[in-house]
Image (cartoon, helix red, strand yellow):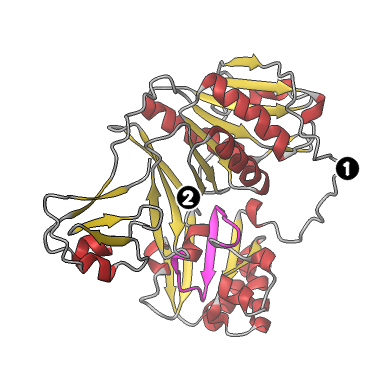
Amino acid sequence: MSDSIKVIVEKCIGCGLCVKVCPFSAITITNKKAIIDLTKCNLCGACKDACKFQAIAIFKPQMAKKDFSSYKDVWVFVESERGKISGVSFELLGKARELAADLHSKVVAVFLGKDIKAKAQTLISKGADKVILVDKPELENFISENYANVISHLIKKYKPEIFLAGATTAGRSLVSRIAVTIYTGLTADCTGLHIDKEKRLLVQTRPAFGGNIMAQIISPNYRPQMSTVRHKVMQEASEDTKRKGEIIEEIIEGSFIDGRVKFIEFIQEEISKVNLSDADIIVSGGRGIADSKNFKLIEELAQTLGGAVGASRATVDSGWISYSHQVGQTGRTVAPKIYIACGISGQIQHLVGMQSSKIIVAINKDPDAPIFKVANYGIVGDLFTVIPLLIKKFKETKK
């Protein structure tokens, strides 16, 4: 139901002020009373503000409170490729356990594919209380339309309270279709999730306005509450092979296959030399390195430590290094054991992508750089002096 507007006849004297300010010519005066043409009005409120007699009111209809008592459990979509379960799914199972504990509910893994029954116990070991399994030849290859049809059917049947998926290419493609089908809200690219216990709401945190603020979003009027979550921002739950759980095998029949889409061939992406997501040590360069040729210094330090090379968006936009190295809101989200930021000021857009690192070391000549607020260790100094000294010391240690 949408907002509406009305003229309070008893207060209106037909002065015409509202007619003058209406930008849509939606108001006329008849018998000394204002008449609003609702087909022209867009509820801008100009007439209400102009009226000295408070004769115009804009009101919001009261929505009937919905009963969500039948919705329960925290669901996680299990993403896999070529038979291997994605790491982001294990991260989500870990976070789902925290959310489910606050809601006094269970964690349910939703797993679709072909010949996948043997992997269901792994999901239980990683935190699932239940695994809803749909094992069909037609689901061997991920096709978002088909997966969305099946999962939408399962959601309508079981009514989960929360549904989580990775903010990956597959996850983004899938959940947007599900949200439209079941008519619910969706928050994309979340970097934080927690439960408002009093209201039983999922509070979803994500960067907004180009990463300049962190917005907290809720979905109070629809269920399930749906989120996609960035890879490497949540911690995996430790594996417990003794955990017990329930495996529910769903037999889906009928027209869940979208005939407009057909799987033709899987073309393996060429493996990049940069594997930021799995690196234990990352050395990143920012605008402070001054020139593309100076990335050789970053590369040498990374090579000495057996790590990968990262970069800030500023250096990628300047053409100093390829996008595959970019860490941040519009690049990769990483969580290495050690993250060394060289000449990076530490704007929120970059911090979003690396703040989950276990140890953060910052090298910057500006003592007031924001990066030092999140760093475990800070070195205030010229990186062109500091980094060669570090390389020399690390090489001596290796000998």
Tell me how many marks there are. Answer: 2
Type of the residue with mark 1: Ile
Which residue in the rendered view is the most extreme toward the right? Answer: 264
Q: Which residue is mark 1?
A: 264
Cα–Cα span, label 1 and label 2: 35 Å
Q: Which residue is mark 2?
A: 191
Q: Residue at x 27, y 32 (%)?
A: 198
Estimate how packed mark 1 is, as few (under 14), some (14 to 19) or many (20 or more) residues with alpha carbons within 10 Å.
few
Instruction: Give how far across and how far down residue 27 sits, in percent.
Output: 30, 61
Find out whether the residues at labels 1 and 2 contact each other: C-beta distance under 8 Å.
no
Type of the residue with mark 2: Thr
Instruction: Give how far across and how far down residue 329 sits, in percent.
Output: 53, 61
The magenta stretch spans residue 339: yes
Instruction: Give how far across and how far down residue 69 sits, in percent.
Output: 38, 21
The quarter of the picture where residue 260 lies is top right
Q: Is residue 78 above or below residue 120?
A: below
The magenta stretch spans residue 306: no
Q: Is residue 308 above or below residue 155?
A: below
Foreground disc of the pair 1, 2: 1
Q: Residue at x 65, y 45 (%)?
A: 173
Which segment did they paint magenta? Answer: 330-348
Q: Is residue 244 above or below residue 85?
A: above
User: In screen coordinates, is 99 left or right of 158?
Assistant: left
Instruction: Give how far across and how far down residue 252 sits, in percent.
Output: 71, 19
